[in-house]
């Protein structure tokens, strides 16, 4: 039997700021990946795998001072957002979904995280949380 636990976080103001910042980075990375895929497609290129896009983003962070702000956030946020964008493009090309659209700042607040085993938080203060077993 597979069990899941839904957790409702009750963050304080400092934690809310961090969560909204993380969501913004995820949205930016998703949109950046879509932009890369579309530019490549218009040039007649083939699908770019998520690993290649992550390498490009790493090079961009290392070589362009305008992207140094990305170091403030976990690499896993951009990694998952790029994977999600690539998966959306794959489904589009297979005819399983519509063309992926860019995410808007005012309509998207998503951070997804699949965790198996245990969950830990290494911050200085814990989130208030309530859980619901299913």
Image (cartoon, grey):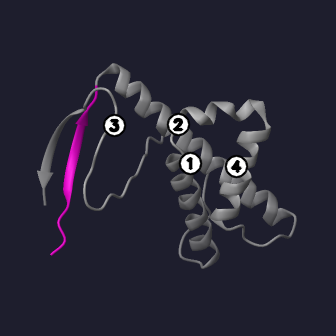
Would residue 11 be found to the left or right of residue 14 on screen? left
- Which type of secondary structure does the marked residue at label 1 adopt? helix
Please give the name of the residue rendered at 54% of the width and 36% of the height, measured from the top-left corner.
105
Q: Tell me the crowding category of disc 1: few under 14, some 14 to 19, or many 20 or more residues within 10 angstroms, Cα based.
A: many
Compared to residue 115, the image places residue 65 above or below, namely: above
Where 96 falls versus 53 (above or below)?
below
- The residue range painted magenta reads 1-11
Answer with left or right where residue 16 lies relative to residue 11: right
Where is the N terminus found, in terms of image quarters? bottom left
Pointer 2 residue: 73
Q: Are marks 4 and 1 in contact (CB under 8 Å)?
A: yes
**Mark toward the start of the polypeptide (3 vs 2):** 2
Image marks 2 and 1: residues in contact by CB distance under 8 Å = yes
Coordinates of residue 8 in the picture (x, y in percent): 22, 41
Residue identified by numbered label 1: 78
Q: Residue at x 53, y 59 (%)?
A: 84
Residue 57: which numbered mark, if any? 4
- Disc 4 to disc 1, how far (Cα)? 9 Å
Of residues 41 and 97, the one drawn nearer to the viewer in this rendering: 41
Can residue 98 be seen at all in this image of the molecule?
A: no
Closer to us: mark 3 or mark 2?
A: 3
Residue 46 lies in quadrant = bottom right
Quickly name the residue at label 3: 122
Callout 3 crowding tier (Cα within 10 Å): few <14, some 14–19, many ≥20: few
Residue found at x 65% / y 63%: 51
């Amino acid at each position: 039997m597979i069990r899941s636990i839904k957790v409702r976080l009750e963050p304080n103001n400092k934690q809310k700021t961090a969560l909204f910042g993380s969501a913004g980075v995820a949205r930016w990375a998703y949109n950046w990946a879509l932009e890369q895929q579309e530019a490549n497609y218009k040039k007649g290129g083939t699908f770019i795998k998520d690993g290649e896009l992550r390498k490009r983003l790493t090079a961009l962070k290392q070589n362009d001072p305008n992207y140094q702000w990305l170091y403030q956030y976990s690499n896993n946020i951009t990694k998952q957002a790029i994977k999600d964008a690539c998966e959306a493009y794959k489904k589009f090309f297979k005819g399983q979904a519509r063309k992926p659209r860019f995410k808007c700042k005012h309509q998207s607040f998503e951070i997804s995280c699949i965790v198996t085993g245990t969950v830990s938080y290494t911050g200085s203060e814990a989130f208030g949380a309530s859980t619901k077993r299913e």
